[in-house]
Image (cartoon, helix red, strand yellow):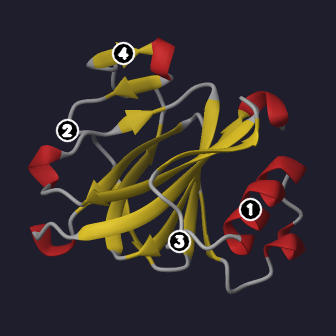
Amino acid sequence: MIFGTLDIDFTQFHLPKALEEALTFLKEHDFMAMEPGRVGIDGERMYANVDAVSTRRLTDTKPEQHKRYIDVQFMVQGHERIGFTCDRGQAAPTEAMPERDLWFYDTTLADEGVLDLREGCYAIFFPEDIHRPLMAIDDTPQAVRKVVVKVSVEAL
């Protein structure tokens, strides 16, 4: 997992080219002017989902994992909490939807840390990262606008 802000020059970190492409896409577009939905970047290699959603109470969220795509989650407007932990084989998925590249885990996942995703910040989750997005701050749901760039692991 990598956490940062677009206010800092991300090219200094020498990330893989595909991740720099994703961050450049986020930096160069006005997502407040875009309708929610899928935005093509480079076919199935890289695309973005523009979301206008609400955060949820902790009890209404589930940890998730993706195996074919890296998530670059970017907060456009609002504030959410995201849980995260490394998949060390400590838990088996409770629900699997491989056709959607989505595996869910029990809500009592051990060793879960949290980060606050504020406007202008991004978090990059790799296939070994189990993450729980859209947790409400102080358990009070709020509307957020965020973008999730999906980067195929094959693009690395």
Kindly state the secondary structure of the residue where label 1 is placed: helix
* Residue matched to label 1: 25
The quadrant of the rendering that contains the C terminus is: top right
Three-letter amino acid code of the residue under disc 2: Thr
Q: CA distance from mark 3 to mark 4?
A: 34 Å
Q: Are marks 3 and 1 in contact (CB under 8 Å)?
A: no
Which of the pair 66/2 is nearer the observer?
66
Q: Earlier in the sequence, mark 3 or mark 1?
A: 1
Residue at image point 74% right, 56% down: 22
Indicate the quadrant where residue 40 lies. Answer: top right
User: Which tag is nearer the camera, tag 3 or tag 1?
Assistant: 3
Q: Dot 4, crowdedness within 10 Å: few (<14), some or many (≥20)?
A: some
Three-letter amino acid code of the residue under disc 3: Ala
Q: CA distance from mark 3 to mark 1?
A: 15 Å
Kindly state the secondary structure of the residue where label 4 is placed: strand
Residue at image point 18% right, 40% down: 108
Q: Are marks 2 and 1 in contact (CB under 8 Å)?
A: no
Three-letter amino acid code of the residue under disc 4: Ala
Q: CA distance from mark 4 to mark 2?
A: 15 Å
Could you tell me residue 25's position as x and y percent?
A: 74, 62
The quadrant of the rendering that contains the N terminus is: bottom right
* Residue matched to label 3: 33
Q: Dot 1, crowdedness within 10 Å: few (<14), some or many (≥20)?
A: some
User: Which tag is nearer the camera, tag 4 or tag 1?
Assistant: 1
Q: CA distance from mark 2 to mark 1?
A: 33 Å
Q: CA distance from mark 2 to mark 3?
A: 35 Å
Q: Dot 2, crowdedness within 10 Å: few (<14), some or many (≥20)?
A: some
* Residue matched to label 4: 96
Instruction: State the mark number for residue 89.
Output: none
User: Which tag is nearer the camera, tag 4 or tag 2?
Assistant: 4
